[in-house]
Structure formats: structure tokens, C-alpha cells
Image (cartoon, rainbow, N blue to C red):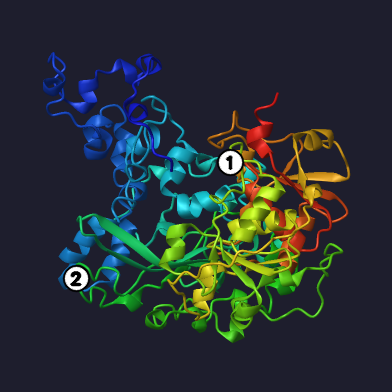
Amino acid sequence: MVPLEPFEKVLVSKAFLETEHGEIACTDCHGGNAAAAEKKSAHAGLDPYPALNNPDAACGECHDEIVGTAKNSLHTTLSTFITVLKTRSDMGKWEEIDKARKNHCAACHTSSCGGCHVSRPKFAKKGFINGHIFQKRSDPFNQCTACHGSRVGNEYYGMRGQGDIHASKYDMDCVACHKAEEMHAAAPADLPGRYHLKEMVACKNCHQGLEHGSVRDHALHIGKVQCQVCHSQTYVNCYSCHVGKDDQGIAYFQNEREIESMKIGLNYDKSAPGAAYNYMLVRHEPSDLEVFDFYVKDAFANFDKVPTWKRASPHNIQRKTWQAANCNNCHGNRELFLAAEDQLEYEQKANTVVVVPDNKVPVKRKETMPIKFPDVTVRKSMVVTPGWLHGNMAKVAIVDARDRDSFRSGHIEGATLYDPLRFGLRDNQNNLNPPAHMSTNFGRAGMSADDHIVIYDKNGRIAGFMAMVLEYVGAKNVSILKGGIEGWEHAGYHLTKEAAKPTPKNFNGQARPELIVNNDFVRNNLDSKDVIIVDVRDIAQAKGLAKHAQAVRAGRIPGSLNLPLSALYMDNGALKSTAELLWLLKSMGITPEKTVVTTCNTGLQAGGAYFILRYLGYPDVRVHDESWVSYSAQR
């Protein structure tokens, strides 16, 4: 969330004065002294956040019925979070536990009328959305996903995975499903979990009677599996949150690890409305036995009473998904179902009711409809595993494509730092520098076109971009490390802080200018049947709901196809199987007989997409180097 300028946070526009709220005196809601002539006196007793601190007086004066329930809604109190904490806790230590909760959790797990209707929520550093003008419908970017961003927002708009069809195809915002009846509903004091709220939205509210429709699999699966089991994509799972205060007394929290994956578990709570099915998606929450140790030791004497793998409803729905593309992508696929081996040692007992034993994994089907993949040959050597790299470190040139601070904190032994965002790959217009210029820099960093160059980063995307650039200037054998730096560590290999000085080389590469196209090429091929332009930005930018800071306007190239880059890379630099990636491209109409042009805002993400397509064996892939920032500036 980009910080707002101070003047944006306090602006009261003239347009506001013409609204119903603008006709109300400032002091009626905020207090203060309207008769005072000086600012200090006028602001005496002023409450800048009346909707948060005193909703009954500030909002209830006019909206008494709504405030009467909303102040006790899950959106405001998240009372079920406290319920779960108490279930796990040694209640003799509750005072210290609740203090920790308030210091670290309450900033996220609470909201107010103002945080949904006039300003950013407290967690998102506040600031008006539209000059103090109240809006009935919440802003999905600055309000809804300002809080629900790391999971819901990233999944819905394609910052993780392909995004949600409700956003990409139907232009639906959060309020399209999560209406006021749900958001304002008072939660009963004994509500065991959010899925038990009777006003909670459900898929069947819109998608009714599917078991009687034309889709055979609906009739077979409805009542047995949660809808998301078949219609969701991979999602983030967090591990081992710890909280504390730094030397300045500032409260912080940190997750030990986040992994993008998908797991099906047993439904342990069929008492929730509409949850009579047997199998459901489960997401790992970051609960840890020692999460509050900074405040109180051994806080969770009853940790085992609540699972840490809990029912999930990812906001990344697609009509067609990999697990539903073939029966045996799910049936007989032990890896997709939660196992005891997926648990941390201290949470084994807590998740007994969720784990799917071998005898409850649906058996593999004997006859299924085969999947037709594009006719390509995957270039397997373009992605290497940590194990392969560990055994071949003396034979390759290893490049760390992260920033300097990350490199200094720990890197793979023998790696050379080359941050492509800083080290002379792009000019002031964000276009690639001349190949000769870049070749000189690569040579100084100890690389030659004949070396086998292996690049790693944190999430794969930057490594993919750098690999594209190296191919462009003539490198013959470039790979990226699967899983990046996190995959290396998770495989058990050590890092070093000692930086080796690279031995300069003559790069001696033969540039390949045909890999790069400009705006003229794109314009001349907008209607070509032989060229497909793939916009790899997130859904919000591709639909013109948001834009890059350097772009003249929001939008996308006419006729381009939007496939977010996050559909091709997972969060931590891991990659989905080549079969799944090829199936996805084919289902999107991105086929190898066409010239595939990747585009984004500045060419960076387009380069990352280029790498994956080349890895998958696509013969003619090119990068729109000028991309949207340049294209949007030309009328």
C-alpha cells in the first residue's frame, strides 16, 4: 500500500461540502471548538477518528440501526479470533496473552465505519479515499484489500496465481458478494468461527441448482467436496509467527516461512452453514506454541484443541483448474491431500481431525479423459534444483540477483552479486541498454557467453528477467535455481557471508535483437492471427483499475490477453509442474505455433514471462521492451 502524502490525508474538498455529510458541522462528529479563532483552541478536544472511537455518537446519530449491529460485527471485533485464543490458552495467563494480542493483532483484526466508507483503515495508515466524501460502496484497493491484501487481494487480482474469474471476466468487486447484510451483521457471543455466521456469503447464493445442470462432475461432487476444492488455485500458507518489540519499543511480528501450495483436508466442522461436505481446502495459519513468548511463557496449554490447518476459501476461483482438468490430478494424488508429514512436530495432535489418511484419499480412476498438451519439448536444463546445483557448483557461474543487503545477509558460496534492477541493464526510459554495454558489465561480473550461468533470487521473477537479458546478449546456457534462495536453504544447504571477488572475463556473446520488439511491432500485429500479445501484469492494472506510477494512463494494449506473471511463478520461486503450466497456456489459447509477445509496464515482468515460455519449449517468444509505460504515452 503506497503511503499517502500529508495533504491527501487531510483534504476536505469543496465537493464534500455539497454532500449530506458535508452539511453537518465538523464538531457534530469530531468535537472541538467551532467558535475558537485559533487552530490550537479550535482543536481542543477534537477526535480525529470518531467512527473508530465512538461510533454510536458519530455514526449512530443517523445510522442507528446499522451501527447497532455493525459495532458487534466480525468486521469490527473479530470476536472469533479471541475465542480461538482462549480455547488454546492457559486462562490463568490471559491478561498477559490479551496484552500481546492488543499490541500485535488488534491493529489488523478490527475495523470501523470510517475505515470502510471514507478513509483507509487504521492498519493501512489511514488517509481519505476521496477528499472526505463518504461512499456507500467500499473501495476494493484502498479499503477492502488494504487489510485483506496478503491473502484475499493478492489472490483475487493475480498477484498470486492467475487471479479470480469474478474479477478478470465479470469485473466484480468485493461488495458484489460481501454485501452490507454480512458486513454489518452482529456476531453472537458464542460464535465458534467466522464460517458459522448465518449471514456469511456462500457460492450457492448465486450458483444455484448446479447438481441438476449439464456438468456431470457437479452431480458427482456436490455434497462431497467444498466448491473451492475443484475451482481454486494454490494459495499462501504461513508458518510460525513470532511477536516482540525492538530496541525502540516498536511492536513487530514475523512469520518464519510462507509457502504457496494447496492442501485438501477432512471437514472437521460440518455444523457450519452449508458445510456438510467431507473434503475441504485447508490453509495453514501461523499459530505457534511460542508466538507470545516475549510476553508470557507457555501461554498455550491447550494448543491441541484447535487445528492449525483450517478451512479456507481462497479468492482465486477459476471455472477450469488443473486439479479438475483430469480425474487423476486429484484422485490418487496423495500429495494434494493433507498428511501427517505436512505437520510441524508440535502441531501433530491439533490436526488429527484434518489429516487425510491413506484410506480416505480417493482412489485413482482407471479410465480418464487424456489431456492434450502443446506439441513442445521442455528445456529441462533451464531450471535446476538445489541438489543439482550443490553437486555442480565448480562447473557453473552462480549469480545472486537480489539486492546488496540481501546478498550480504547470506548467499550461496561462490555467487556473484548482480542486481539487475540497479546494475545498468535499463536506461532512463526503462528500456534495455545496448547489448554491448550490458555485455561489458556481465564480463566484469565474471560471466562469459560460453559459461553455464545459474541465477537465483527470492521469488524467481527477477532471475527469469535476468536470464532473458543474458540470452538477448548472447549467453548460450542460462538456468534459474528452482525455489531460489529459500529452496536452497530448505534443502539443507548453508549460506555464507563471505563475498568472493569475481574474475573479469570477455563476455563475447552474439546479440539476438530478434528477441526484443518495440511499440511499432506491437501496433502492426494487433490483428495478426499469428501473433499473440500476452499482458503479464496483475488483473487490476490490465483492467485499468490501477496503474504504474510512470504510466501516462491506466489500461492495456488493445486485443492483448491478460495472464498475470504470478500464474507462472509461485511465491518463493518454486514452479508448478511443466504439465500444469502447459495446460494453463493451452487453455488460455497461448499456443506454440504463434509468435508470443510478452508485455507489462516496463519490460521487467515481460522478461520473467519470456523465460518460462522458453523453458516450456515455445519456439518464438519475444519481449515488448517498451511495454505499457511507453505505449500509453503515445497516442
Q: In the rendered view, would you say 279 is above or below 359? A: above
Left or right of 252 in this view: 448? right
Left or right of 322 in this view: 92? left
Residue at (48% x, 66% y) in the render: 237
Residue receiving disc 1: 540
Left or right of 480 in this view: 486? left
What is the quadrant of the N terminus in the image? top left
Please state the horizontal and vertical placement of residue 35, each as a whole percent of the image.
Answer: 13, 14
Q: Determine contact: label 2, label 1, CB under 8 Å.
A: no
Locate residue 244: give its quadrant: bottom left
Residue receiving disc 2: 296
Residue 222 vs residue 324, the one in the foreground:
324
What is the quadrant of the C terminus in the image? top right
Residue kind at label 1, given as amino acid type: Ala
Crowding near pointer 2: few (<14 within 10 Å), some, many (20+)? some
Residue 306 vs residue 270, the one in the foreground:
306
Residue at (55% x, 66% y) in the render: 416
Residue kind at label 2, given as amino acid type: Val
